[in-house]
Image (cartoon, rainbow, N blue to C red):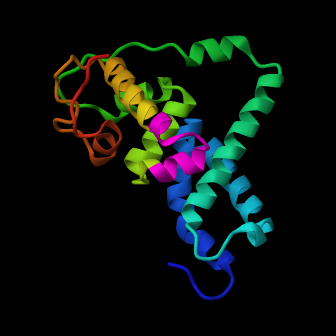
Amino acid sequence: MSSPGDPRDDLPEHLPALRAFAISLCGSASAADDLVQETIVKAWTNIDKFQAGTNMRAWLFTILRNTFYSLKRKRKREVSDSDGIHAGKLYEKPAHDGRLAMTDFRRAFQELSPEHREVLILAGASGFSYEEVAEMTGVAVGTVKSRVSRARSRLCELLGLAEGEDPISGADQATIAVLGTSGVQAA
C-alpha cells in the first residue's frame, strides 16, 4: 500500500473511498468532489504531519470530516435561500415492496443527521472498526456503537420497515453494509 518514498504518492489510491465518504456527507457529487479536492490539498500541504506507518486512509478521512464540518459551520453563518432549503427537505415515504430501491435508500440516508451518516459509512460501508471510527471522529467507542445503532434504527424507520422485517432482502451490497445484518430493532 505504502511506498518507501514520498507519502504523497499514495494519495491517489484513496480517492475513490474519500469520494464515497464525501458523497455520503454532502449528498451531492459536485459538493463531494469539491470536498475531496479541499481534503487532498490540505493533506498535500500538511504531509509532514502524517506519521509514516499509520493508517493514511484514516488520516485522510479525518481531514475530510473536519473540513466538511468546518464548511458546514461557515455556511450556517451565511444567509441562505429558505425556500430552497425547505423544498429540498420535502420527503414522501416510498411504497415498500420488500426490496430497497437505491433512490429510496439515498433519500432516507440523507434524512439522517450528519453524525449518523458518518458512522454508518465509516463503520458499515468503509469497514473501519468501531475503535478506528472513534479515533477518527474524536468520540468514545461506546458513542460510536450507540450512534450506529440509532442510525440503523432511524434509517429502517425512514424506509418504512416494520419491526422484525428483513431490511436487506434483495438489497444491494452498499445497503447491506450500512444497514447491517442483524435485522430491525425496535425503534
Q: In this view, does 38 lie to the left or right of 54?
A: right
Residue at the bottom extreme? 4
- Measured along the vertical axis of the image, is residue 37 above or below residue 141? below
- Measured along the vertical axis of the image, is residue 96 above or below residue 23? above
Considering depth in this image, is 55 or 81 the residue closer to the camera? 55
Q: Is residue 71 left or right of residue 135?
A: right
Q: Give the range drawn in magenta.
A: 131-144
- Is residue 60 shown to the viewer in this render? yes
- Residue 136 magenta: yes
Considering the whole magenta stretch, tell me its main secondary structure: helix
Q: Where is residue 55 in the image (x, y as percent from the top left)?
A: 55, 66
- Measured along the vertical axis of the image, is residue 65 above or below residue 149? below
Residue 163, picture quadrant: top left
Residue at the right extreme? 78
Q: Residue drawn at (68%, 75%), measured in percent from left and top? A: 8
Q: Position of residue 172 (x, y in %)?
A: 26, 44
Number of numbered discs: 0
Q: Position of residue 40 (x, y in %)?
A: 69, 61
